[in-house]
Amino acid sequence: MLYLVGLGLSDETDITVKGLEIVKKAARVYLEAYTSILLVDQSVLESYYGRSIVVADREMVESNSDEILRDAQTEDVAFCVVGDPFGATTHTDLILRARELSIPVQAVPNASIMSGIGASGLQLYNFGQTVSMVFFLDNWRPASFYDRIKENRDIGLHTLVLLDIKVKEQSLENMARGIKIYEPPRYMTVGQCAQQMLEVEEDKKEGVYGPDSLAIGAARVGGRTEKFVAGTLKQLCDADDVLGPPLHSLVLLGKRAHELERDYAREFALDKDTWDKVWAANYGKQ
Amino acid sequence: MLYLVGLGLSDETDITVKGLEIVKKAARVYLEAYTSILLVDQSVLESYYGRSIVVADREMVESNSDEILRDAQTEDVAFCVVGDPFGATTHTDLILRARELSIPVQAVPNASIMSGIGASGLQLYNFGQTVSMVFFLDNWRPASFYDRIKENRDIGLHTLVLLDIKVKEQSLENMARGIKIYEPPRYMTVGQCAQQMLEVEEDKKEGVYGPDSLAIGAARVGGRTEKFVAGTLKQLCDADDVLGPPLHSLVLLGKRAHELERDYAREFALDKDTWDKVWAANYGKQ
């Protein structure tokens, strides 16, 4: 059996009891660690689970899935995924390959950022499609998120923006030379995301959002040090110090927002006067 | 401290290790049991947690929250919620009340149907806003879901439809007489939902969807007996026997769907020829 085990959002105790039993008994345990991370190190997980863990990087999952699936017809393999196994990143390829090999698959659900973001006080019913934001390069500034946000904003809905992480990336130079030296991991912050969003609006000028649009920055959702800050996109450009260490996410508010959402999130406002004023002028009216 | 503890979707072992520790130690343990249910009885939970549980019905949570919050400034109260504490139903009122009373609040996230539905093979990125479907009465057929689905469909997105449950409801007669006898619980099925959806389309005639629109019926998501069926809305009207016992949910597909979603969900098709034909004609083109 191939088990896809969700680990939840924060630390080693966020695994479910069901998931922990599976991890303890499986023949092999993999950890998918290139699309999200827990807030604790691999060694903490290994000691808590009482198991050694093979970290599965993107290359392994995408090009060498048969090694992960080896003998899974007759023994149990646990493939651990931060968050929910079917959350922000799905492993459809891996599962379709398991089906081809007649390997039964069972998923053990857990919290995902896509539901965990409800802790911001915004109602999950009022979210449209989720988008991703990648680190811009000088010559590569993918902006498809902008049209998606426009679709959500046109009907008054919130947008959850998931932020890029770079783990085990080579510099272009090392990649060109075939040198397997990896850069330190990088995690996009709410400030970087807000800045890139405003740059794209500057380019496109469709008025999808602007410096005064309300948003919520989220850090370490589901963890003991979870932190939210609410404010305008302009304010959030400079709020990384308040938010603290990764992982960060951002929600751009939709105008259909409810007054209960206003009251709840107001608690997180960097500046309650600005929050009240901008809200009164532009939100809660659809 | 008020702990909002997510219980996950299926059975007593879906609680996280962190959540279980809190439940075992709390001064009082409540279970919110009017918006969703686990697939196991309260007695199973009590024996697994080693604690007795007070079932909190809607009346208690909405009108008597101070009893739940009693002494929570100085002792720990665990308020358990099926799924994620901020999932389909939020308990914003309870938390705002706790804030007023200077009671610290901490949530323990868990799987929610809103992320768990990813097990259907549909990508969570491609979902628009979630809607709810209630049991229609002769003179009460709330159809606001229709406009919301239209918004999602106009931009090619999937819609998750959450289905009504009726727990501890009085008949109109008993309510009028003040007799506290409750009807047996009722859980809406995928067939009932699909039928009501088609009736509303018949009334409104805006062509938002029709009998040949593709959808996925889901039962007991996240549980060992999880079951999906894929087909047209017309086919899903008669698929309740295949799906089996509650809880059910339904996803109406958006046309922007990706071929990986087609291939994954095809495995669940009631009739693969129909699935392929309808897909080829209408989906994956946006």
Image (cartoon, coloured by chain):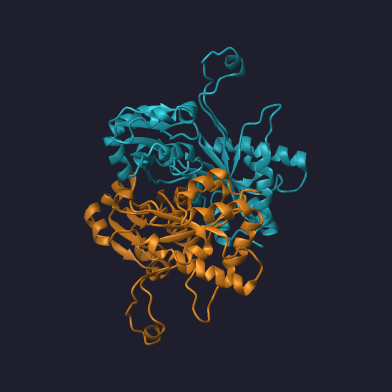
Chain colours: A orange, B cyan
**Left or right: B181 as drawn, with respect to A280:** left
Q: Is residue B155 above or below residue A237?
A: above
Q: In the image, residue A286 lies at what x, y percent?
A: 66, 49
Q: Quadrant of the N terminus of chain B?
A: top left
Residue B79 quadrant: top left
Q: In the image, residue B215 lies at what x, y percent?
A: 62, 47
- The tally of labels here is 0
**Left or right: B30 as drawn, with respect to B191:** left
Q: In the image, residue A131 lies at what x, y percent?
A: 54, 61
Residue B256 quadrant: bottom right
Nearer to me, A121 or B157: A121
Q: Quadrant of the C terminus of chain B?
A: bottom right
Nearer to me, B57 or B121: B57
Q: Is residue A196 visible?
A: yes
* Residue name at image x 29 percent, y 35 percent: B74
* Residue name at image x 39 percent, y 30 percent: B68
Q: Is residue B41 visible?
A: no
The outermost residue toward the front is A273
Q: Is residue A23 above or below residue A177?
A: above
Q: In the image, residue B42 lies at what x, y percent?
A: 38, 28
